[in-house]
Amino acid sequence: MSLKLYFAPGACSFVPHVLLEMSGAAFEPSMVKLHKGEQNSEDYKAINPRGQVPVLVSDGQPVTQIMAIVLHLDQLFPQAGFLPAEPMSRARALSTLAWMNNTVHPTFTHIFMPQKFTDLPEVQAALKPYNTQLFRGMLSELQDLVKAASAKGQAWLSGDRFGPLDAYSLTLTRWGTIAGIAPEAHPELWAFVQKVAAEPAVARVIERERLQLNMGPVA
């Protein structure tokens, strides 16, 4: 089995990057420098015509989109237990993963890259504060999930095994600091994210991607 992950530091590709590192399998991490436009190169678009990360090339076949990649990795490495096996627990985990990917993630994009949604400067300026408030509320929802898992005695968001929800929670919380939302605004979530970051496989990915958890201003 050959595995190659195209990732961008700090992007949502952090999620499959962590899962691959957790799996213990050999894989090739390949950095795509978004700020240099490498995602729009002919070579990269031959792999993913949409010019997005992540892309997982599994035995020569490209798989795109977080949901599809996570499900593929879960099937490749069932022993890792990335997603719960019990049907209802699995459905709930996938529901939360879909919410993170199709709701929380795009909300941040409206803050970080408003030019993707309008070419009017005044509308771009209005999108940032509006979506920052929405994102703040979503981080509160994520904190509630952390508290609920803790109340059930779960070590991680989807149960006793580390999974994609935990990796995505770190990414989304980190993005919140980029949007100016201090991590202290969600103390239980911030404590959980630091627990995630302390996992050896996660720490290795953070080092490889050269990430700083709190991107907000220094007090």
Image: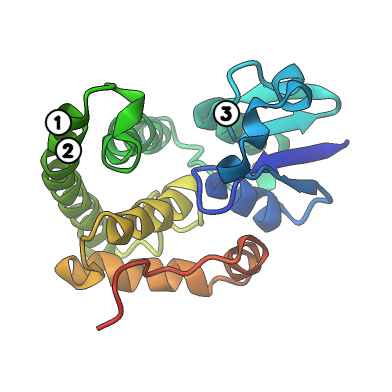
Whole-percent x, y for residue 194 in the image: 40, 73
Whole-percent x, y for residue 41 in the image: 71, 26
**Looking at the rendered structure, which numbered label has been put on residue 122?**
1
Left or right of 45, for residue 217: left
Cα–Cα span, label 1 and label 2: 5 Å
Q: Is residue 37 above or below residue 185?
A: above
Which residue is labeled 3 in the image? 52
Which residue is labeled 2 in the image? 125
Left or right of 157, for residue 183: left
**Residue type at tag 2:** Ala
Cα–Cα span, label 1 and label 3: 27 Å
Q: Is residue 101 above or below residue 201?
A: above
Q: Are marks 1 and 2 in contact (CB under 8 Å)?
A: yes
Mark 1 crowd level (few <14, some 14–19, many ≥20, 10 Å Cα): few
Q: Nearer the viewer, mark 1 or mark 3?
A: 1
- Tag 2 secondary structure: helix
- Check the picture and name the quadrant holding the N terminus: top right
**Residue type at tag 3:** Gln
